[in-house]
C-alpha cells in the first residue's frame, strides 16, 4: 500500500478541512492539498518519472515541501529529502548516489545545486516549471505500491565519512505512524503540526500521522527554527505539536524565560535525535508543563525504537523517576529491543551492550551498499551502534555510540555518564567528554567545557558522584562545541584536536 493513500482518503472524506498554512495564512484545504500533489505527480510522470525512481527534495520548510513529497509518492517514486543546511557539494553526492534525475528546490538552494556538477534537473518551486506542474493533468489516484517498496531514501548525517542511504519503505512509515498513536501521542483533526525542525528529517516524517488524522500543517514564515515565532504561532493556533532536537528544547526554555513566554498553545513537543540531559528536561518541564515526549529512533528505524511518554517525563513520584527520566523509554509497539554483544548474542537485563532492534519499522538495508548492510543487520536484528542498558522494567538507557566509549586502563567509561555529572554545575553551559590517547592507559578521560566553572569544583563534583577513574584528567575550555546540521556534537572533531 502507498502511504499517500492516507492523503487521498482524507481529501475524499473531509476535503474542506484546512490543511496547509504558511505562518498564519491558509494555503490549501485537504482537497487542494490532494489536487496539487496529484497534478505535480502527473507532471512528474510526463517527465519520465516511473514507480521506483528517486526524486530529490532540497528545500527549506514550506507548504510546497509537503506537496512535492506527496506528489513523489502519488507518482510511485521514492523521495530523497536533503537537509537544507547542507552544502551544494554534499547535496550533489546524495543526488548522484541515489540516482535521482530530478530535484525540487527552493530559492538559494537551486543555485547551490546548479553550481555543482550534478547531472540533475532542478525544479525551483518559485519558477515557471513548477507553476506548470501545479496546472498539469492530475493522476487519478496514488500509484499502487507494495509495502516493501522504497518510499523515502534517508541519508545519514555522515559525521564519520560519506553518508549512507537508508532505505525506508512504505511499510516502515506506516508502522511508525501506527506506533505513534499507540506509544507517543494522539492526534486529532483539531491539532496543528508545526514544522520548525528540518522537514528532511523527523519533522517531515511526522507529517504522515497528522495527514491520517486530518490535522493542520503549519510552516513558519522563517522557514526554520525561531523561538519567538514558535511561541507566537502556538499561541495563535493552539493545540500545536512539534518535533524538536534536544538542543532546540534547551534553546526554547532559555528564550521563553528571557521573553516571559509560557509556551501557551503548545500541546506536544516530541524531542529526539539524542537523549536530553536530565537537568535540561527538568528545567523545560518546570517551565512549559507536561508537554514533552521523548522518542528514540534512527534513520534505520525512523522514530520507532522506544518512547518515553509525557507521564514518565513529568513524573516525580515514582521511586526511580530520575532513572526513568534519564532513559529513552520502553520499546514501541512495532519493534523488539534487546541488548547484545557485537556478534548479536543477547545479554541479560541490566547488562551493558549494543542496542539491537527487530520489527517492521526496521530498514531492509542501505542503498547500493551491501557491505554496510551486512554489518548493520545480523540475523534480522539491526545493530544500532548505540550502547545502552535495558532494565527489568523495559526502560532503555542510552550510554553512547559504541565508537564514543572510552577504554582507560582496561575499564570502560561512558562519556554521557560523566557529562550528566558535570552539567550539574551551574557554570557549565555545555560539555562533551572524549578519550585522549595515553601512552600507559590507552586513553584518558578529557572534558571540553563551555562555561567558567572552576576545575577544582568540577573535580569535587565528579569525585562525589562517580568512580575516580571516570573523572576527567583535563578540562579544556571551548567557546562552542562543534555540531552537525542536526545539532549533534561532533566528537570526531574534538578528538581530532589531539592528533598531529
Image (spheres, rainbow, N blue to C red):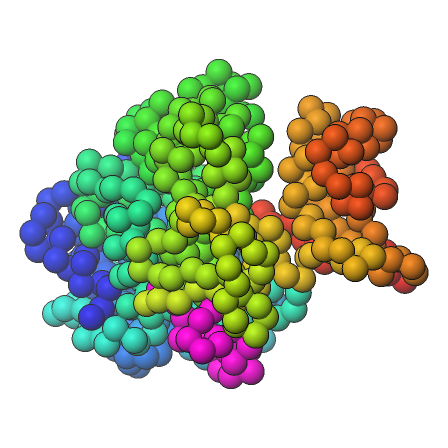
Residue toward you, 222 or 189? 189
Identify the residue at horizontal 34%, vertical 74% (top origin): 150
Residue 344 shown left or right of residue 408 in the figure = left
In magenta, the rendered stretch is 361-382
- Residue 175's place in the image compared with 484, above or below, is below
**Is 368 within the magenta?**
yes
**Residue positioned most to the right:** 439
Q: Quadrant of the C terminus?
A: bottom right
Image-based side of 16 in relation to 75, left or right? left
Residue visible at 69% across and 48% down? 415
> Residue 103, image x and y in percent?
42, 68
Foreground of the two, 91 or 258: 258
Q: Is residue 1 above or below residue 452?
A: below
Residue 113 appears anywhere in the view: no
- Tell me if residue 130 is in the magenta stretch: no
* Residue 187: quarter of image: top left
The answer to whether residue 235 shows anywhere in this view is: yes
Instruction: In the rendered view, tell whether residue 9 sits above or below residue 62.
Output: below
Residue pictured at 58% horizontal, 47% vertical = 487
Residue 104 lies, with reference to residue 476, above or below; the image says: below
Residue 308 x %, y %? 41, 42
Out of 127 and 113, give the one closest to the viewer: 113
Q: Residue at x 42, y 25 (%)?
A: 317
In the image, 42 versus 210, the foreground residue is: 210
Amino acid at each position: 500500500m502507498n502511504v499517500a493513500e492516507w492523503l487521498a482518503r482524507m481529501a475524499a472524506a473531509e476535503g474542506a478541512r484546512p490543511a496547509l498554512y504558511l505562518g498564519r495564512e491558509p494555503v490549501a484545504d485537504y482537497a487542494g492539498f490532494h489536487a496539487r500533489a496529484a497534478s505535480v505527480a502527473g507532471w512528474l510522470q510526463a517527465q519520465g518519472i516511473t514507480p521506483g525512481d528517486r526524486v530529490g527534495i532540497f528545500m527549506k520548510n514550506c507548504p510546497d515541501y509537503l506537496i512535492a513529497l506527496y506528489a513523489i509518492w502519488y507518482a510511485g517514486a521514492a523521495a530523497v529529502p536533503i537537509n537544507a543546511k547542507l552544502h551544494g557539494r554534499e547535496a550533489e553526492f546524495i543526488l548522484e548516489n541515489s540516482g535521482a534525475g530530478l530535484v525540487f528546490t527552493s530559492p538559494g538552494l537551486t543555485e547551490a545545486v546548479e553550481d555543482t556538477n550534478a547531472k540533475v534537473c532542478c525544479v525551483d518551486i518559485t519558477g515557471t516549471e513548477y507553476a506548470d506542474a501545479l496546472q498539469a493533468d492530475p493522476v487519478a489516484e496514488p500509484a499502487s505500491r507494495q509495502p516493501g517498496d522504497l518510499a523515502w531514501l534517508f541519508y545519514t548525517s555522515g559525521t564519520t565519512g560519506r553518508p549512507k542511504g537508508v532505505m525506508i519503505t512504505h511499510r516502515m512509515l506506516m508502522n511508525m505512524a501506527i506506533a505513534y498513536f499507540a506509544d507517543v501521542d494522539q492526534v486529532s483533526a483539531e491539532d496543528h503540526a508545526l514544522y520548525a525542525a528540518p522537514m528532511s528529517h523527523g519533522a517531515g516524517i511526522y507529517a504522515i500521522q497528522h495527514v491520517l488524522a486530518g490535522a493542520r500543517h503549519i510552516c513558519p514564515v522563517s522557514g526554520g527554527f525561531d523561538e519567538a515565532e514558535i511561541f507566537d504561532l502556538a499561541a495563535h493556533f493552539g493545540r500545536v505539536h512539534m518535533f524538536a532536537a534536544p538542543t532546540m528544547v534547551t534553546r526554547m526554555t532559555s528564550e521563553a524565560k528571557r521573553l516571559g513566554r509560557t509556551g501557551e498553545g503548545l500541546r506536544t513537543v516530541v524531542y529526539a535525535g539524542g537523549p536530553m540531559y536530565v537537568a535540561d528536561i527538568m528545567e523545560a518541564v518546570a517551565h512549559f508543563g507536561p508537554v514533552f515526549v521523548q522518542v528514540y529512533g534512527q534513520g534505520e528505524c525512523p522514530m520507532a525504537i522506544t518512547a518515553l511518554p509525557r507521564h514518565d517525563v513529568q513524573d516525580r513520584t515514582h521511586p526511580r523517576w530520575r532513572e526513568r527520566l534519564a532513559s529513552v523509554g520502553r520499546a514501541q509497539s512495532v519493534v523488539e529491543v534487546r541488548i547484545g554483544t557485537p556478534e548479536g548474542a543477547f545479554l541479560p537485563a541490566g547488562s551493558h551492550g549494543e542496542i539491537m532492534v527487530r520489527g517492521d519499522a526496521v530498514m531492509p538495508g542501505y542503498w547500493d551498499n551491501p557491505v554496510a548492510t551486512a554489518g548493520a543487520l545480523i540475523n534480522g536484528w539491526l545493530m544500532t551502534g548505540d550502547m545502552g542498558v535495558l532494565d527489568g522494567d523495559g526502560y532503555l538507557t542510552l550510554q553512547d555510540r559504541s565508537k564514543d566509549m572510552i577504554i582507560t586502563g582496561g575499564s570502560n567509561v561512558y562519556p554521557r555518564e560523566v557529562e550528566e555529572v558535570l552539567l550539574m554545575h551551574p557554570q557549565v553551559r555545555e560539555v562533551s567528554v572524549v578519550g585522549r590517547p595515553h601512552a600507559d592507559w590507552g586513553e584518558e578521560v578529557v572534558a571540553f567545557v563551555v562555561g567558567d566553572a572552576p576545575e577544582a569544583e568540577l573535580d569535587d563534583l565528579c569525585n562525589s558522584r562517580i568512580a575516580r577513574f571516570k573523572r576527567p584528567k583535563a578540562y579544556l575550555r571551548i567557546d562552542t562545541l562543534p555540531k552537525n546540521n542536526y545539532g549533534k556534537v561532533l566528537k570526531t572533531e574534538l578528538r581530532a584536536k589531539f592528533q598531529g
